Image (cartoon, grey):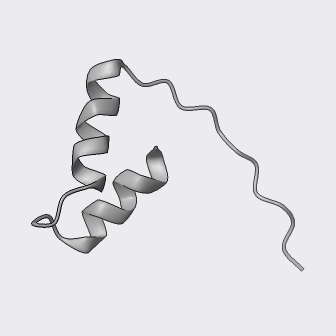
Amino acid sequence: MAGWRQAVELAMTDEEIETLTALSRSRTEPARRVSRAAMLL
């Protein structure tokens, strides 16, 4: 049986957060990129 996953802290700059936010709200980017951006946020 698998155990709990350990969360890893991710350091991001404000610019990177803005980029990921824009990607996560995009309607023209592929769904794969949108969901990955949302996961990172």
Residue 13, how many percent across, how many down? Answer: 36, 19
In this rendering, position of residue 7 left or right of residue 14: right
Residue 24, how many percent across, how many down? Answer: 30, 54
Question: What quarter of the picture does the N terminus occupy?
Answer: bottom right
What's the residue at 42%, 25% (across, down)?
12
Residue 39, how many percent across, how many down? Answer: 47, 55
What's the residue at 26%, 55% (across, down)?
25
What's the residue at 65%, 39% (across, down)?
8
Residue 2 placement: quadrant: bottom right
Numbered circles on residues, count: 0
What's the residue at 34%, 31% (across, down)?
17
Residue 15, how many percent across, how many down? Answer: 26, 22
Closer-to-camera residue (7/38)? 38
Residue 14 placement: quadrant: top left
Q: Is residue 39 above or below residue 31?
A: above
In this rendering, position of residue 16 left or right of residue 7: left
Q: Is residue 11 above or below residue 31?
A: above
In this rendering, position of residue 31 left or right of residue 39: left
Q: Is residue 31 above or below residue 8?
A: below
- Determine the residue located farthest toward the bottom in the rendered image: 1
